[in-house]
Amino acid sequence: MNIANVLISTTKKFHSKPAVIFKDQPISFLALSDNVFKLANALLKSGIKKSDKAAIYLPNNPEYIYSYLALFSLGATVVPLDYMLTEDELASCLSHCQGKLLIAKEKDSLSLENLKKRVPSLENIIVLGESKSNFKSFQDVLNSARPLPVEIEIDDHDPALIMYTSGTTGSPKGILLNYRHLDGSPKAMEYFVDLTDKDVKISALPLSHSAGLIYIQNCICYGITLVLMERFQPLEFLKNIQKYRVTCFHLVPSMYYAILHLKEFESFDLSSLRWLVVFGAPSDPHLLRRFQQYCPRAHLLNGWGLTETCPPNTVIPLGSKKIESVGKPAPWMEIKVVGEDDNELPQGQVGEIVIRGWVVMEGYYKDPEATAEVIRNGWFHSGDLGRFDEEGFLYIAGRKKDMIKVSGEIVYSFEVENVLLKHPAIQEAAVVGMPDQLRGETVKAFVVSKKGLEVKSEDIRSFCRQHLAHFKVPHSVEFRDALPKTPSGKIQKEKLKMQEVI
């Protein structure tokens, strides 16, 4: 995808229309385009060239969007970094990718001067807002150039992104995607949903994550208006839907739970919504059905995909009632379910989901061993467990690492979590396997109870016995005030397990 050409074309059609609304301030497509090309020319003048590694370390704001699009216009390799990363984590990522440029916003816990000393490749830092250092300000850089379109020849196989992710387990890896991969999400949106320039979408997901980048691509490819939130705040999210007549959005399950548990939820007018999607983790269909009670005209969509495979890769068709499923694959990719021997399993059997096609990443940057572990014979092994039904719909059973073996019996944590979330006193739940000398592993549940409601662990276990086989019932239940999560809202089960071991 040539981002500069896409932006120029969309701006011609919708120049005065709001492209982004941030903190109630609209930014037209013309203003967006001007700022992108000002920044692109300024960066070009400063020495940033095609394939240079340029990192962005900002909270959600319009400058993040300008930076993304300007760097893509230059054919640079963009390294979006989560604003929650510590200085040590930043130094590690920037050193690993040999970042040349960093666009950042300062914060008390971070010394940019120290960071520059720690990363030898880092030649330039641009700072958003007031700076305590001598680095150039973002606004000064923006004002130093004219909004002239840049003409850089970009090949499909040129490196476009290195997205560092730890998911919910393990060490961060740099997912390397090329410029053709930028076509993946817009092409999927065109195939799965009827997105048009009349739509208004709202994003509270971090722009540093693939789910956040999808919103930016939707904006410039389809001419939609994007309501951008700096962070996810459930009440503000609902206020924005009502105020700007938002028509569609995608969130992760934990964000839906947070919205549903607001006492003010029922008072908002959500009639403008026409579809909403849950991504990012296995979800409880009861969650979506509850949400739909307050926006009955909206289509409920469930989907699946990974950063490594340019999500979304599957989405249920508009109007489908099979919201327990994550849908069917797009026709430009192949998806199958395999056993431990990598052979395809019969319909209905649970195994690992593997995917093949041009949407699969180039690999983990500078990590051929990790790449070889997940891409075998052309198939990307997702680590997710699932099954296909007789109509070709895919169902997620959980993560392979979340499979618990109790006395030889297989327990899928997702199945237990769904039962726990049906309990009227439970707001959030996570299930993990804990080592046990007698059984191999036992099922342990971590739960957050709803405010003002008290429940005992034995009551929860008794409730589970009514819905689950005896070996799936949690052996123990621990109450928490909150569950650890990634910035994109996924529960960090490894942290729960590590805390228990410690």
Image: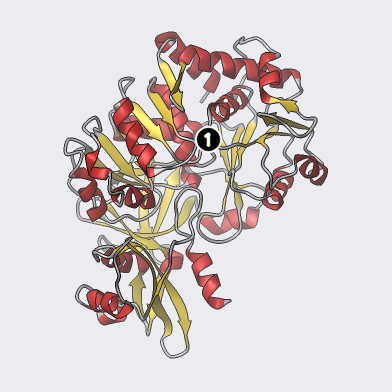
Q: Position of residue 42 (x, y in %)?
A: 70, 18
Residue 265 can be seen in this image? yes
Q: Position of residue 442 (x, y in %)?
A: 40, 80
Above-or-below relation of 103 to 340 = above
Q: Return the residue nearer the eye: 4 or 309.
A: 4
Above-or-below relation of 165 to 142 = below
Toward which corner of the image does residue 156 lie, by quadrant?
Answer: top right
Q: Specify the quadrant that holds the C terminus.
A: bottom right
Look at label 1 and name its amino acid: Asn
How packed mark 1 is, by other alpha carbons closer than 10 Å (few <14, some 14-19, many 20 or more), is: many
According to the picture, the residue beneath numbered tag 1 turns out to be 60
Above-or-below relation of 351 to 74 = below
Q: Residue at x 62, y 9 (%)?
A: 148
Residue found farthest to the bottom = 438
Q: How many marks?
A: 1
Above-or-below relation of 219 to 109 = above
Q: Return the residue nearer the eye: 117 or 477.
A: 477
Q: Secondary structure at mark 1?
A: loop
Is 326 left or right of 112, judged from the image as shown? left
Residue 246 can be seen in this image? no
Q: Position of residue 72 (x, y in %)?
A: 59, 26
| Coloring basis for residues | secondary structure
Q: Return the residue nearer the eye: 323 or 287.
A: 287
Q: Position of residue 321 (x, y in %)?
A: 17, 46
Is 261 left or right of 32, judged from the image as shown? left
Q: Residue at x 31, y 63 (%)?
A: 452
Is 95 left or right of 455, judged from the image as shown? right
Q: Residue at x 59, y 43 (%)?
A: 83
Toward which corner of the image does residue 186 lie, by quadrant?
Answer: top left
